[in-house]
Image: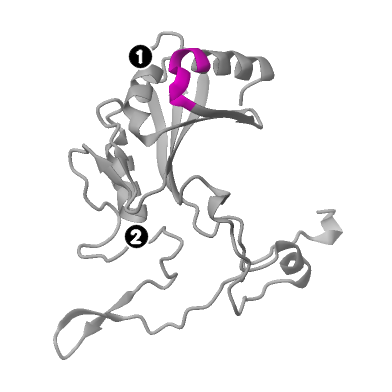
Amino acid sequence: MLTDLQASTLSALLHERLGAQLQALTVDRGELTAVVAAADISAVGQILRDAPDLSFRLLVDLSGVDYQTYGQTDWATHEATSAGFSRGVAAASAAVPEAATPGRFAVVYHLLSTAHNRRVRLKVWLAEDPPRLPSVTEIWPCADWYEREAFDLFGILFEGHPDLRRLLTDYGFIGHPFRKDFPLEGYVEVRYDAQKQRVVYQPVSIESRVLVPRVIRGDPNKGH
């Protein structure tokens, strides 16, 4: 977490170093987020890594985000909290403005400068489908498996990646399970067929439904 002075100092450095490549810069709860265009990610990454007064040499994490139905909910949290655990029976019908976000997908990079003890979050919006942007493996080699994970779970294509294969799902898996439109039960299920004496895939037999999160309350006798 950055102090106000640290956030102000780092913001000024980023504006100076990135110039027009910096689309937006925000500070929230001591965390600084810089937004850049997908086409500029390689150039920006090199500046952040190599500039002596920045030195963001460590890529701590890289993740994809799906903003489909952003701002829309299948349940009302406050009502669920007062009523207890339950299950929703229908999806919410509230429409989300098309311009609620600059794109459906985003890629987020968490960077650390050990030389200056600073952190920054780098964010890139992706509007097209399939979403695509340049790989940063040549800048931060540890991005290799991070990008493979984002490709596997979100379907984000990292151009120039040396070996962009699925990482967590099975061979022949269909779809990208962290996308908001991917069914919670998946598309197929696996079972062992005694007659064929092998594992077979078949369409899921579970009926889709909207889930409401479990609400956990403290013990009133203990002052929670």
Tag shown at residue 127: none
* Up-down relation of residue 12 to residue 110 (above or below): above
Which of the two residues, 26 or 129, is positioned nearer the viewer here? 129
Question: Which colouring convention does the figure follow?
Answer: one colour
Say which label, 2 or 1, has the lower sequence index. 1
Q: Amino acid at mark 1?
A: Asp
Q: CA distance from mark 2 to mark 1?
A: 34 Å
Residue 86, can we see it? yes
Position of residue 128 in the picture relative to residue 123 (left or right): left
Residue 113, can we see it? no
x%, y% of residue 207? Answer: 46, 83
Give the residue pinned by disc 2.
Answer: 176
The question of residue 56 being in magenta is answered with: no
- Label 1, residues with CA under 10 Å away: few <14, some 14-19, many ≥20: few
SS for dot 2: loop
Which of the 4 image quadrants contains residue 144? top left
Which of the 4 image quadrants contains residue 181? bottom left
Q: Amino acid at mark 2?
A: His
Residue ranking furthest to the left: 196
SS for dot 1: helix
The quadrant of the image that shows the N terminus is top right
Position of residue 25 in the picture relative to residue 203 (left or right): right
Give the residue pinned by disc 1.
Answer: 50
Which contiguous range is marked in magenta?
Answer: 15-22
x%, y% of residue 10? Answer: 55, 16
